[in-house]
């Protein structure tokens, strides 16, 4: 057990260092934070937000302030999961397959389960860091911090599992760029729900749709046991589907070419 934990710790440290050295991975954190700042200034310029020092929506009517906070946090949540969990994993795995690093690790008596678990933990950690930074710069009420982080962590799980499969399926970073598009789109899907009620009724069933609904209820103060059932079922269903897909495919896809 201790030997396995030491191997896992070494893999996590290696992956964390690789992420820190890769400009693309750093961009996965910078982009969501940058867009959070942009949205905050953009809303302020449109007269929808108060001064930055007062926080998002501090001087507005409650309904408008609630909507503003949701728009900013909705964007931050989706981008953190899409960039931190999906893009970092898919490109990172594709790079290691391209350089035959995975094969080397397997020959060094490291199990496939340890490799995948380490990468999932690092991707989740990257997502959490991005979410914390986005929330800080968003100016949203700190009473929403716990809900935002909970939604971000839970919503990242199915995307991480799907990204592991897609990353293993990518032969190199060029194919990873193509394969990552569908995962990124479904991760960002709830952002488009703000355009119309019809779109929202569809994207609420996306992998991040359930946690987005939870975030919407938390911001509006309408959290109720009866209202939590559907978002939780959607999220749980996607976690199960992603876990089954990963379990069935990862050993076959792990054989790099």
Image (cartoon, rainbow, N blue to C red):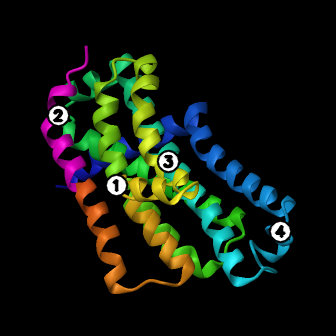
Identify the residue position indicated by label 4 in the image. Answer: 52
Q: Secondary structure at mark 3?
A: helix
Q: Which x, y percent locates residue 92?
A: 43, 31
Q: Quadrant of residue 136?
A: bottom right
The crowding category of the residue bearing disc 4, from other C-alpha atoms within 10 Å (few below 14, some 14 to 19, many at least 20), is some
Question: Earlier along the polypeptide chain: callout 2 or callout 3?
Answer: 3
The answer to whether the residue labelled 4 contacts the one labelled 1, judged by CB atoms less than 8 Å apart, is no
Distance of label 4 from label 2 (alpha carbons): 48 Å
Residue sitting at x 15%, y 42%: 247
Up/down of 172 relative to 198, above or below: above
Determine contact: label 4, label 2, CB under 8 Å. no
Estimate how packed mark 1 is, as few (under 14), some (14 to 19) or many (20 or more) residues with alpha carbons within 10 Å. many
The residue at the point 21 percent across, 35 percent down is 110
Please provide the residue range marked out in magenta: 240-257
**Residue highlighted by disc 3:** 188
Q: Say if mark 3 contacts mark 1, CB within 8 Å.
A: no
Left or right of 113: which side holds 86?
Answer: right
Q: Is residue 133 magenta?
A: no
**Residue under label 1:** 157
Circle 2 SS class: helix
**Residue found at the far top of this picture:** 257
**Residue drawn at 19 percent across, 41 percent down:** 245
Q: Main secondary structure of the magenta part?
A: helix
Q: Which residue is mark 2?
A: 249
């Amino acid at each position: 057990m201790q030997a396995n934990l030491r191997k896992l710790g070494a893999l996590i440290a290696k992956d964390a260092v690789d992420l820190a050295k890769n400009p693309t991975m750093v961009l996965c954190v910078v982009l969501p934070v940058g867009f959070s700042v942009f949205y905050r200034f953009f809303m302020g310029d449109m007269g929808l937000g108060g001064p930055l020092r007062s926080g998002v929506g501090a001087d507005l009517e409650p309904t408008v302030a609630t909507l503003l906070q949701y728009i900013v946090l909705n964007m931050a949540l989706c981008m953190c999961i899409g960039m931190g969990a999906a893009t970092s994993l898919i490109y990172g795995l594709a790079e290691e397959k391209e350089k035959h690093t995975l094969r080397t690790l397997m020959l060094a008596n490291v199990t496939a389960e340890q490799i995948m678990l380490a990468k999932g933990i690092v991707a989740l950690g990257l997502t959490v860091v991005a979410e914390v930074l986005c929330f800080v710069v968003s100016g949203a009420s700190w009473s929403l911090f716990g809900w935002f982080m909970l939604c971000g962590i839970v919503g990242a799980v199915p995307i991480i599992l799907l990204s592991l499969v897609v990353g293993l399926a990518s032969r190199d970073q060029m194919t990873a760029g193509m394969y990552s598009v569908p995962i990124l789109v479904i991760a960002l899907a709830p952002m488009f729900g703000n355009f119309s009620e019809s779109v929202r009724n569809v994207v609420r069933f996306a992998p991040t749709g359930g946690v987005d609904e939870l975030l919407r209820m938390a911001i509006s103060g309408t959290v109720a046991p009866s209202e939590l059932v559907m978002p939780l079922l959607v999220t749980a269903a996607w976690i199960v589907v992603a876990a089954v897909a990963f379990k069935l495919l990862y050993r076959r896809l792990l054989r790099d070419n």
